[in-house]
Amino acid sequence: MTDTPARLLNLLSLLQTPREWPGSELAERLGVSARTIRRDIDRLRDLGYPVQATMGAVGGYRLVAGTAMPPLLLDDEEAVAIAVGLRAAAGHAVVGIEEASVRALGKLLQVLPGRLRHRVGTLNAATVPLMTGDGPTVDPDDLTVLAGAVANHERVRFGYRARDGAETRRNVEPERLVSTGRRWYLVGFDLDRDDWRLFRVDRLSEPFATGARFTPRPLPADDAAAFVADKLRRRNTAYTMVATVHRPADEVDRWMPWTGDYLIEPIDDRTCRLRSRGDSLKWLASGLLLLDCEFEVHEPPELIDHLRTLAGRATRAADRAH
């Protein structure tokens, strides 16, 4: 193999397999001399790839962890597997890796050949994830578009459905994507309203990057996460719940289905007082039921009425089953 760049790529691909390669085997695989392999190893090191050599009669090489991760070379099957895995991570909002998954997915999809994009799309279309909880689903393709626009400081347009169902078109300078574990939010400056806004990504439709670049504006908060937390705190004041839960306080805290503001106060070894705020009676009721224990709601009265409605509905369903 006389093409040096192609040979280096092939050598790097072999070294990224988790094993030690004798120099003689690498030379045989690439059709060059052991001396050429040594020179190519030095070239890779100059490019920042941490290749470690072992001493001995035969000698060997392997790629080790360095101070920075060099570019990876993936074969077709590996690229498809990673793309599908990243989509799953983004769609399930896995705590701690959500935004990183979206950024990595955007980079990978940008360089995937057409044949592999088709394979990824076919596989995703043929599979249905089993979602847990009642969190809304988000299209990973929408997240990818938004993440790319954030990274490139590029304006985006999209349709948006407000809480009251009103449909509007938005022209936004995107700042950050933020995941709360249950929902994805886009923080951006709404050009038509001349103000910073918070958008639920599950209410977005057909987002696309316009190609118009912008200079980022100073965010009126320490960071995007703080901006989202403040907005949600102001919104989640519609209902303040107080309930007695017949389960130890540490267990309730461990199995708490909510994300957001809540306070648990032990009453005794088996009972605790739970206080929480939320903008949805359905969400508060479902959280209590998911604790899988007896409880009494003291306030608000709207939640008590809602639980009566749910109880009646469940009783009628059970009666019809018999």
Image (spheres, helix red, strand yellow):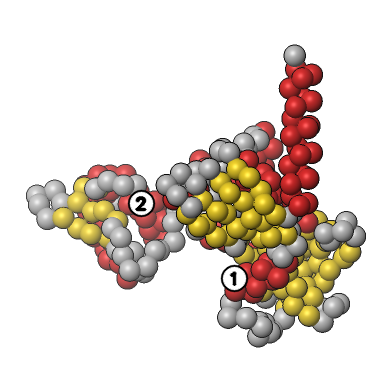
**Residue in the picture at 78% in, 51% down:** 302
Checking the image for residue 173, the label placed there is: none
- The amino acid pointed to by label 2 is Gln
Can residue 305 be seen here? The reply is yes
Q: Nearer the viewer, residue 33 or 153?
A: 153
- Answer with the quarter of the image where residue 134 lies: top right
Quadrant showing the C terminus: top right
Q: Residue furthest left?
A: 57
Q: Residue furthest top?
A: 322
Q: Nearer the viewer, residue 15 or 179?
A: 179
Percent coordinates x, y for residue 228 in the rendering: 65, 69
Place residue 105 in its image quadrant. bottom right
Among the two numbered marks 2 and 1 on one chain, the one whose residue lies closer to the N terminus: 2
Q: Residue at x 78, y 32 (%)?
A: 312
Please say if 99 is above or below 197: above
How busy is the neighbourhood of tag 2: few (under 14 within 10 Å), some, or many (20 plus)? some
Q: Residue 147, relative to residue 306: is it above or below?
A: below
Question: In this figure, which residue is indicated by the disc labeled 2?
Answer: 16
* Identity, as a three-letter code, of the amino acid under mark 1: Ala
In screen coordinates, is 59 left or right of 13? Answer: left
The percent coordinates of residue 107 (x first, y second) are 58, 60
User: Label 1, on which residue?
Assistant: 225
- Residue 211 seen in render: no
Disc 2 element: loop
Give percent across and percent down for residue 57. 9, 49
Do the numbered discs 2 and 1 sit on residues whose CB atoms are within 8 Å?
A: no
